[in-house]
Amino acid sequence: MAAAIDLGAGDVGQSRNSRAATFTRVSSANSRIAYGAANPCPAYGIACMDRTGVPDRFAGMWFRPHGWPFDWGTLRWCQALPSPANGCLDAENVALDEFGHIEIIGHHVNYADESDYTDSVVQATSRSRPRAGWNAHVFGRCDVARLQLEYELASPNGLVSTCLSLGTNLSIVPSATLIAAGGSVRITGNLKIAVASAARSLSGDPLSGRAINLQRRALGSTTWATMAALTATGTAGSYAISFAPASTVDYRLSFSATSPEGLLGSVSSVVRITVTACTAVAAVGIGPQVACE
C-alpha cells in the first residue's frame, strides 16, 4: 500500500499542470498517512483526509484495510491481491483522489449518465476494476481546471484545461503610426487571460507560446488578410514583428484558440500606420506646416 500511495503522490506532480503543491515522503514530515481500522473516516468511506494545516502541512490521510466489510460488500485493494481482479479498487487512484482533496478539489459533479466520469479523479465514489476510470493515475481535465483556477498555470506557456472556456485579451502597440516611405515599424502584441472573476487566479495572467498573427486591411476595405506570425519576445505574453509598410494600411493582431486548450480567441484593436512621401518624418509638434520636399 505504501508504494501505491507514493505513486499517487507522484501522480500529483506529473499531472497538476499548475502551481499546486507537490507531495514527497520524508521521515520527519508532520503530515501523516495511515492504513488500518482505526481512522476518522465516515462509515461509508474507503479513505479520507483532513487538510487542516494547509499549506504547510495536512492533519492526515487514512485508508481502510483490505477486507473491511461494507454494506455493499468487502473492500478489496488491487495492490493486496496476487494480481488485480474485477471488483478491486486501485489504491494509487484513491490516493490521487485524496491528495486532490488536500489541494482543495471538491467532488466532481457528474452528468446523470456519468458520461463525464473520467473528466475527474476526485469523485464521491471510486470505481472498481474494470470500469472506466478505475485505474486513472493522472488528474482529469476538470481536476486540472480547478487547480489552475486556484493556483495559476505552472508557467505562461502552460496549456489551460479544456474544462474551462476563458476569454483572452490581445493588445497591439506600434512603435510609430506615422513613418516615411521605406521606413520600418515594430508592432508588439500582449496576450493575457481576460480579467474576469470567473478566471479566479488566472485573471489577467500572461500567455506565452501561442500563435499570434498580424493582419492587414486596405483602406476602404472590410476584408482582413493575414500577413505574418509574430515571434515571442523575452517578456511573458509578449510577441513582436518588424516590417516596412509600403502604404498606409490598417493593422490588427489575431489569436485563434486551438482545440486542446480552454481559451477563446481574440483580436486586438485596429491601428492605422500612415506612410508619407517624405524621406524622413520629424516629431509632431505645434508650429507652421511644412510641405514634404
Image (spheres, helix red, strand yellow):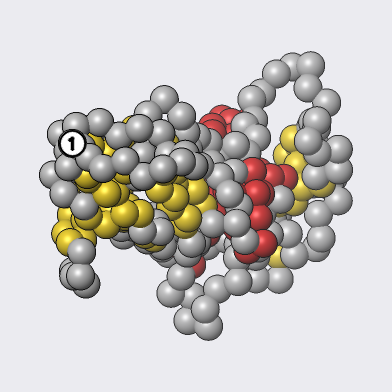
Q: Is residue 99 above or below residue 215?
A: above
Left or right, 121 with respect to 212, comes to right
Say which of 54 and 30 sits in front.
Answer: 54
Image quadrant in which the N terminus is located: top right
Q: Give residue 257's position: percent from left, percent from top.
A: 34, 57
Q: Nearer the viewer, residue 7 or 11?
A: 11
Camera-side residue: 83 or 275?
275
User: Residue at the location (47% across, 33% down)?
Assistant: 236
Q: On the image, numbered disc 1 is attached to which residue?
A: 293
User: For the point 71% across and 50% down, which residue is it?
Assistant: 104
Snapshot quadrant of residue 20: top right
Quadrant containing the C terminus is top left
Residue depicted at x 82% and y 46%:
50
Dot 1 alpha-carbon crowd within 10 angstroms: few under 14, some 14 to 19, many 20 or more: few
Is 234 on the left or on the right of 205, as rendered? left
Residue 176 locus on image (x, y percent): 36, 39
Question: Which residue occupies 47% across, 81% down?
Answer: 113
Above or below, comparing residue 231 to residue 207 in the picture? above
Residue 255 in view (yes/no): no
- Check the image and report above or below for 234 versus 39: above
Which percent across, then down, holds residue 258?
A: 30, 56
Q: Is residue 26 visible?
A: yes
| Horizontal side, residue 292 vs residue 25: left or right | left
Task: List x then y, in percent, for residue 239.
Answer: 36, 37
Secondary structure at badge 1 equals loop
Q: Is residue 162 above or below residue 22?
A: below
Instruction: Residue type at mark 1: give it.
Output: Glu
